[in-house]
Image (cartoon, coloured by chain):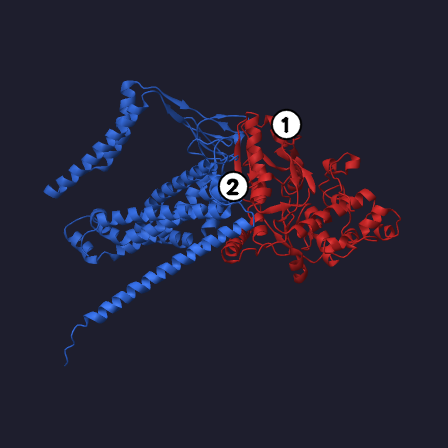
Chain colours: A red, B blue
Amino acid sequence: MSEFMSHVMKRVATAFALAIALVFCAQGAFAQATLKAVQDRGQLVCGANGTLAGFGMPDPQGNWTGFDVDLCKAIAAAIFNDPSKVKYVPLTAANRFTALQSGEIDVLSRNTTWTMSRDTTLGVDFAAVAYYDGQGFMVRKSLKVNSALELNGASVCVQQGTTTELNLADYFSANHMDLKSVTFATADEAVKAYDTSRCDSYTTDSSGLYAERLRLSDPSANIVLPEIISKEPLSPAVRQGDDAWEDLVRWVHYAMVDAEEMGVNQNNVDDMLKSPAPDVRRLLGVQDQFGQSLGLSNDWAYRIIKKVGNYGESFERNIGQGSPLKIARGLNALWTKGGLQYGLPIR
Amino acid sequence: MTTTAIDHSSRARRRIGNIALQTGLVVVVAGLIYAAGENAARNLQAAHIASGFGFWNNTAGFDISQTLIEYSSGTSTFGRAFWVGLLNTLLVAGLGIMFATALGFVIGLARLSKNWLVSRLAGCYVETIRNVPLLLQLLFWYNAVLKALPEMHGSVSIPGGGLLNNRGLFLPRPQFAASSPYVTMTLLLAVAIVVGLRIWAKRRQNRTGEQVPVLWPALGLILGLPLAFIFLTDVPIRFDYPVLGRFNVLGGLEILPEFAALLLALTIYTAAFIAEVVRAGVLSVPHGQTEAAQALGLRPRTTLRLIIVPQAMRVIIPPLTGQYLNLTKNSSLAVAIGYPDLVQVFTGSVLNITGQAVEVIAITMAVYLFISLVTSLLMNLYGYAISVGER
């Protein structure tokens, strides 16, 4: 209950902040230089999930970890050379965009799908696809269901205000199946309702299914059905109007992917400084001045890899084989290994 | 002692001054509102956030678990979703008001009872329920209701063809065939007869002092006349019985556990407040009235019904209106348990899919304001109509 009250309060607070900002701020107040504001503040404010294991959640000691959190740490490392200079703001699906629009957060790294309507009507821009995901279903093994197409007439728990809600309705109507959806304001409530068998199935992005399954009362009694019914390219989001900041966030992501392609990781990055390979030299700032073009120092990518690691390391540590989720690279493998992660050239 | 002439000119000057001041204030406030709105619109445009009400006709795309009107996720618009949510809110608020008033009157009068146990129990009820936040009570009823209900395969059969499980209460849905307009006409005829009967009974009471019982004949007519018509003309009523499907119950009239929990919580909570309002109203009637009634030989129940409560209503109606408005607005807590009321559907799903927070919240606020204004208008009219004319 207190969690619910706290996100009601958060929702009210961010909507209120947005209203105040819209009504009283002068025009153009939003298009200020975010990088300068972050540097002056000495801290990055990062919108995160707060309850999704593997992506963005504080551990029992209160330190934030996760795949999305790692991107924020990488941005902070690039700017301040200190990945701990981040303040994390837990957001629900309901208030994540208003928090970004109102200026409460600098970047939204919260398993958010990049869609056309969000890109064009919300005043936000998406930097780069960090994780190629898709929507799936989880059911109890006792129902003896092996495919999502057998879910005709089933009750499905889903979170409001997400692409999940829309895809669910589309999938069921396209396959002429009857749907009884039970919607909740937060993922927590939806998972709890599924756990108490208020509904037969729970649906969200497939990575989220594996994460939430860990929190059920009996994880092994639940299976994830094989069907992936939608494309969910998860991407960090920034406000529209600040191109320099958008470039920065985008190239932090691509630096991590490029590093993995070039074989540069946390352990060997110091040795790689001495590498003769021109692409490694450009990446780590040994030659040319790509960091300056972003408003950062030239060793921006070196800082990222040293403090946080490359894309593959972040993946494996948070959601891959080095974590309880054990998600395979799949679509998120490098393009040279059959996946879709394609590092844009730093040159 | 000096006589002061009435200073017409200074009074006139003061009046003009007052009018000028008030006009000036209205202009300033209106100007502020306009400037704020225009600034917000300009800022929205600069931030490339979509604005305007064009989203009303876009396809909704999401499913709603309880719809009193036709709604389909693939073809219905956001506007349609708004009406679905609004009807759900009105349903739970309307039923909540009815049940809370009934329960509140009973508890309030019970608290004034001479029976020590009854009055103490009522007092405990009021003090406990009033002091626990409604959200907690709602979550309690939701979880208590859900935990008490069996799962699908253990559904309880209700005699008459109903089913009860943790997905809801499923009752046979009557489907009238071609003669249904006639059945409705019979029902309306019964209502008209009841109204006429009541007017005739009141006139007779004013003339002769004799009371004619109206309640039971009225109920009998309203229920009996259409049923008699159905049986006599042999109109076939088909019932859509609920049956257990693979995952859920198919068919029948579905009552969601969320709806039941919300209705229960709202009724019980508001009844505690209405009980105190009723108690205040009854205590406000001078004790002389009760003594006079006793002197006339009327029994306590008759005294209460005919003498005390009608006079108490004048004091009861204004705060009772406030409780009705509270109940209507408290129904927005449906968000906590997933009941698809206006706030859940509109400011939950629609707001987050379209991203247009300003327009959606403004519409929702305007709707609640409208409902509240209509409720208080009707209650004030009712209060005026039954006023005893003393003051």
Relative height, residue A39 to residue A252 (above, below): below
Pair 1/2: label in front: 2
Q: Do labels 1 and 2 share a chain?
A: no
Can the viewer see residue B113? no
Q: Mark 2 points at which residue?
A: B349
Specify whether residue B155 is in view: yes
The CA distance from mark 1 to mark 2 is: 28 Å
User: In terms of secondary structure, where does tag 1 sit?
Assistant: loop
Q: Residue at x 21, y 32 (%)?
A: B193
Q: In the image, is A335 to the left or to the right of B254?
A: right
| Residue A326 in the image, given as x and y percentages of width and height | 73, 40
Side (left or right) of A142 relative to B326: right
Q: Which mark is residue A147?
A: 1
Q: Is residue A205 left or right of residue B385?
A: right
Locate residue B96, reporting x and y percent. Answer: 38, 43
Viewer-side residue, B372 vs B126: B372
Q: Which kind of residue does numbered mark 2 sit on?
A: Ser
Give the SS element for disc 2. helix
Dot 2, how many residues are within 10 Å of its Cα: few (below 14), some (14-19), or many (20+)? Answer: many
In the rendered image, residue A285, in percent from the top left (x then y), is placed at 81, 53
Q: Label 1 marks which chain's residue?
A: A
- Please give the name of the residue rendered at 76% of the width and 57% of the height, measured from the top-left corner: A297
Label 2: chain letter: B
